[in-house]
Amino acid sequence: MNTPTLPSSRDDCLARDAADPLQPLRAQFDIAEGLIYLDGNSLGVAPRATAARVQQVLRDEWARDLIRSWNTAGWMDLPARIGNKIGRLIGAAPGECLVADSTSLNLYKVLSAALGLAGAAGAAAGARRVIVSERSNFPTDLYIAQSLAKQHGCTLQLVDDAAELPGLLAGLAGRLAVLMLTQVNYRSGARHDMAALGAAAHAAGGLVIWDLAHSAGAIEVDLHRDGADFAVGCGYKYLNGGPGAPAFVWAHPRHAQGFWQPLSGWLGHAAPFRFSPDYQPAPGIARYLCGTPPILSLAALECGVDTVLAAEPLGGMAAVRAKSVALSELFITLAEARCGALGVRLASPREAALRGSQVSLSLAPPLHEAGYAVMQALIARQVIGDFRAGDPARLHAVPHLLRFGFTPLYIGHTQVWDAVHQLQQVLAGGEWRDARFQQQAAVT
């Protein structure tokens, strides 16, 4: 990807934003005046349409029409309808993706299914019993994998460096059950090559599961093209579905009916309203449903997904990704130029193709322990990112991080310029030393 010439002044940034075809999409969101929100990689901004839509569901569909709304308002269709919309963002065909439960529960479902398929394929030799992931994967993914590894008699093997993965997978030929990775790392923003790693896992005889929590709505994804077997992801980051929004699940059609997912709830039955005492799985992805859909949350999520789909006539995810690269390249250049001498170091891959839509920074000694306070001081200046703690015993390898997410639907070049200016002021003036910024809250 050819990176365009970066803006050289704030006025240049203003001009770029004025000419940006995606700039009108910012009006979809409810953002306080003067706030620079660079945390959409953790929680997306509320769409303006969401409050009215949820109120409509409360007032008209629930309070007035009550239980009739399962039919008259199409409540039962929401998991599949919204799943199809998300499918347009991840390269899934209609009927392959649906919305249900949380990312953790969906990962449990698909990893169970993948291990069941791997066990069936390797039953003769009992050989395919290794799950591979990376130590820096999001903890819930690792916890779910640890739990299922015990249940299935598998080994969970973790790598510290993603560069180790191709060689490790080749060495596990015939023994690999599942490669389970998050496409964009939640700490560093590093992006895996989905196609290459998928091909390596398949060559070793394994299946591939991708967590798209930091991908869907942020970068171009094509699950079919890149050879994925299963995928999950959340709805509250780049999909702007609201705090704790329902998640999504996808299974390749060749696998969707090959295994009963373990959370075989009533809604995943082939005929839920037959109320049979014996479970018969629904065809295809519908069997990955479990309990009754959370209608209010689904209504909010659909509004969020629609904000991303609004980019389709403006170039779609290709245009979103191109702007994301431009914003993050500008941020890196300015942060190093203005704050490098103050201790700021880039902790994300420098090459844009190796990053998602996030840039992480670390602080060099003697400021390496000050990351949380620096972020709190920055937030007090109306620039919102977040902090992720490193390993105190290995800060050289796993540093504390300041994370900044770039959501092109509501962030422009001028916000990036101003954010780095504020970071420079926080560091140069030492205001992060103020006692009020030292008190660590429960959520960082």
Image (tube, rainbow, N blue to C red):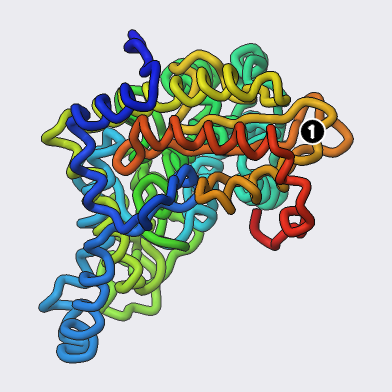
Q: Is residue 438 above or below residue 214?
A: below
Which residue position holds label 1? 368
Where does the image place residue 310, in percent across and percent down from the top left? 18, 44
Viewer-nearest residue: 126 or 312:
312
- Local crowd size for mark 1, using a 10 Å CA cut-off: few (<14), some (14–19), many (≥20): some
Q: Is residue 188 above or below residue 140?
A: above
Where does the image place residue 328, in percent across and percent down from the top left? 45, 26
Viewer-nearest residue: 388 or 334:
334
Image quarter of the N terminus: top left
Picture residue at 15% right of the left edge, 88% below the top = 65
Asked if residue 238 can be seen in this view, the reply is yes
Look at the numbered disc 1 and give the secondary structure of its residue: loop
**Which amino acid lies under the numbered mark 1 shown in the image of this protein?**
His
Q: Residue 171 sits in which quadrant? A: top right
Where does the image place residue 173, in percent across and percent down from the top left? 61, 17
Picture residue at 21% right of the left edge, 31% below the top = 18
Picture residue at 50% right of the left edge, 41% below the top = 114
Picture residue at 19% right of the left edge, 77% below the top = 56
Viewer-nearest residue: 238 or 92:
238
Q: Residue 31 sits in which quadrant? A: bottom left
Question: Does 70 sit left or right of 194 as displayed?
Answer: left
Asked if residue 254 can be seen in this view, the reply is no
Question: Does 41 sit left or right of 76 as displayed?
Answer: right
Q: Is residue 240 above or below residue 201?
A: below
